[in-house]
Amino acid sequence: MKKIMVTGAAGFIGFHVSRKLLQEGHVVIGVDNINSYYDVKLKQERLELLENDHFRFHKIDLADKMALERVFIDEGPQIVINLAAQAGVRYSLENPNAYIQSNIIGFMNILENCRHNKIEQLIYASSSSVYGANQAMPFTPHQSTEHPLSLYAATKKANEMMAHTYSHLFGLKTTGLRFFTVYGPWGRPDMALFQFTEAIINDKPIQLFNNGDMLRDFTFVGDVVESIYRLTLTEPTPNSDWDAMNPDPATSKAPYQIYNIGNHSPVNLMAYVETLEKKLGKTAKKDMLPMQAGDVQKTHADIEDLVTAVAFKPSTTIEEGIGAFVDWYVAYNSKTIHKEMS
C-alpha cells in the first residue's frame, strides 16, 4: 500500500485514476481546485463516488504555493500523479493566463514539493498536442517536439522540460505521459464525444472542423488508467546508452522518461460520428466548419515504449468505448433529471 497524491482528482482522468488506486488498496490524497471551466456539479459528483476511508481530499489551487506545501507536509505522499491542468486547445486562445497559472506555476510548485519531500516518483500529464507541426507518423516520443501550435501545447512541452531539469539536478524520478484524445464515462462536457452525444439526442447540429476530415487516436479512459497504474509500479531509470551527440528526447542520463498513451489506431472523425449515431439510433445534423486555430489534422501514437515498460497495450475499440460512454451518459442524465424533479 502506498500514499499517492492525485492532483486533478475531481477531473475526468484524475477521478478514474483515483478510483483505480483505491480499488487496489492505496491511500489517495486528492487535490483539486474545482474550478468552473466546466460544470462544477459533475466534479462534485465524481468526488462523491471517491468517498472512502482511504481517500482524503484537499480543495486547493496548485498555484497556491503555501497551501500545496502544507498538504505535502501533512499527508506525506510517496508518489505524485499530477493530472491537474487547465485543459483545452481552443480555450487557450481565449484565456492564455489560466494556462500559465495552472500549467506552469502550478507545475513548478509540484516539482519543488516533490524535490523537498523526497517523493519516490512523479508521474505527470503531458499531451499529444506537443507534437504540433510535426507530421511524421506515427508520433514517437523519440522525435522532436519543438513546434507546438497552441499555448496549451507549449505549456505541456514546458512541463516536460521542467521535469527533466529536476530529474537532472535533484535525481527526481519523473515520467511524462502524452495522452491521445482520451474519452469515456464521466468525460468532460467540453470534449467532442460529450458534445456530440448531447447535440444528437437534442436534435441539434454537431460541429465538425476541417469538414470532418480529421484523424484521431481515440483512447479509452480505462486503458489510460491501467497504463498509469502499471507505471506507478515501474520507476524511470537513467538511460546508460543516452548519447549527448545524438540526444533521445524520450530518455536521459537522468531518471526521466516520456511515454505516449494512445490506442495506436487512428480513426476518421466521420467514422467516430457514425459509430455514435449507430449507438444512439439517430443521425446527426452536421455543421461543416474550417480547421480551428491550434488544431492538427491527424494524431497517431507509437506506443512501443509503453508496451515494453508495462506489458499492456491500450486496445479498446471505439464501438466498445463509445458504447460505454453513451450508456453512462443516458444513466447519468436520467439520474440528474430525477434529482431535479424530486
Image (cartoon, rainbow, N blue to C red):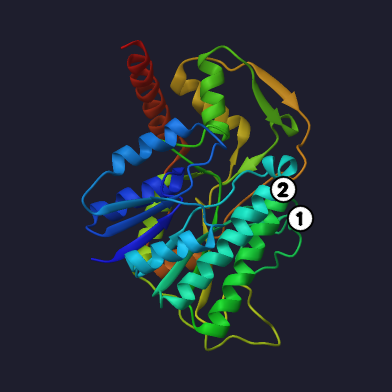
Type of amino acid under label 1? Ala
Q: Is residue 238 above or below residue 121?
A: below
Q: Residue at x 62, y 30 (%)?
A: 270
Residue, disc 1:
133
Which is nearer the eye, 320 or 335? 335
Quarter of the picture containing the N terminus is: bottom left
Q: Element under label 1?
A: loop
Could you say which is closer to the camera, residue 84 or residue 191? 84
Closer to the chain start, of discs 1 and 2, is 2
Image position of 76 with respect to 43: above or below? below
Residue type of the residue flagged with mark 2: Pro
Image position, residue 109 (x, y; %):
54, 65
| Disc 1: CA contacts within 10 A as few (<14), some (14-19) or many (>=20) | some
Q: Which quadrant would the C terminus be assigned to in this image?
A: top left
Whole-percent x and y of residue 323?
Answer: 40, 30
Q: Is residue 296 visible?
A: no
For the residues marked 1 and 2, what is the alpha-carbon distance in whole angstroms?
Answer: 20 Å
Q: To which residue does mark 2 refer?
A: 96
Horizontal relation, residue 152 to residue 186: left or right = right
